[in-house]
Image (tube, rainbow, N blue to C red):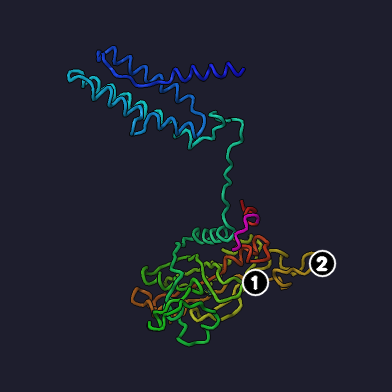
Amino acid sequence: MAQAKVRKKKVATKMAYSVSTLTDYSAEALERTSAELLSALKHEAAAVKSDADRKVFRDRWMARKNGILTQINDLWLKKAPKESKREAGRMVNEVKRAVEDIIEKADRVESATPVVSGIVDITLPGVQRSIGAEHPVIRTTNEIVSVFQKLGYSVAEGPVVETDYYNFEALNFPPNHPARDTQDTLFIAGQQSRAARERLLLRTHTSPVQIRTMETMRPPLRIVIPGTVHRNDPPDASHSPMFHQVEGLAVDTNITFGDLKGTLDHAMKALFGSSVKTHFRPSFFPFTEPSAEMFVSCFICGGSGKRGSDPCRPCKQTGWIEILGCGMVDPNVFEFVKDNGYDPKKVSGFAFGMGSDRIALLKYGVDDIQLFFQGDVRFLQQWG
Ligand code: DAH
């Protein structure tokens, strides 16, 4: 056994290819020489089994100093007699290309395929890449947006870092008005040197995009505005300092509260099922007059306030769930964009805003908003 091994090694050493000087530059001799080299190359390439082998192989053939390619350049090309230079050059180039090709291929195979002792192990299972899932809040937002898109609404967006002017002033929140306190605003630091209306904050609602859009698009207008908003609310099961809203705005001549009710009633039936009812209660928002809160009949208990003999928690046993704020656009708001065709004497409109996270909680029966933002894959996988 031991003897056989030794013998084999000796044979292998003997056969190792080396570049010798060329004396015969005839066409046949050149052909033979290059064929010999290429056959040695293929032989050696096939014997490469590991990363270490690959490195040795690469160096032996490609090393600048004394690699086989360098040697053939020196021994075959540079030393060729003048009249054979052309033929020798062509042969050397061909050989070079073949060597580079094989080595490049060997490198590529290495980086793409797992190799077990130089062999691709086709019995191994493939690498499974899990397909991402749409986040429940994004999914809900998209559902809401698409309900309105089918009614002819377009989608508008605006910045999350907003000025006081768009977040408050142009929405008819006068400076220092107590209505601002209801928004628990997060302000950007170091803004004292700016004029009050220029000061930056994290938008507390998507309503500023109403103004931004009316500044650039003339009436009639129908838009929905999905987006992220921030408030200085400590996180708990139903609050998060970052959450999501979908805003809506319709402006035309003769838009009435009846249009608002009909549109929102249709949207709620499309979102929660055709059997839900809607119900409006008077409310206050600085940018709408009159304003309302809209409720839908509880789609969990069917409006009874009870689940079997247990109280229904999502509607607090009332049979109604508050979904959004809405109202007719206050003429004072139109005054800020009057020059772009929004003369409050000529146009009217309605607006609404809802929290997509809250709607996602209700739709999917999740009882803690924090779960949406903690990024726990085990929770998110349920939507995959
Ligand atoms: N922006 C309000 C909020 O975040 C929600 C809202 C109420 C939006 C009434 C509206 C609206 O467009 O008309 O509390």
Q: Is residue 383 left or right of residue 305?
A: left
Can the viewer see residue 20 in this picture? yes
Question: Neighbour class for label 1 at 10 Å: few (<14), some, many (≥20)?
Answer: few
Q: Given the image, on which type of amino acid does mark 2 rest?
A: Ser
In the picture, residue 212 is in which quadrant?
bottom left
Question: Mark 2–mark 1 contact, CB under 8 Å?
Answer: no
Using the image as rendered, state which of residue 3 and residue 314 is in the foreground.
3
* Residue 324 counted in the magenta span: no
Q: Is residue 103 left or right of residue 227?
A: left
Q: Which mark is residue 236?
A: 1
Q: Tell me the quadrant of the picture where the N terminus can be found.
A: top right
The segment highlighted magenta reads 373-378
Q: Position of residue 360 (x, y in %)?
A: 61, 63
Tell me the residue at 27%/26% (across/down). Answer: 74
Point out the residue furthest to the right here.
309
Question: Neighbour class for label 2 at 10 Å: few (<14), some, many (≥20)?
Answer: few
Which residue carries the number 2 mark? 309
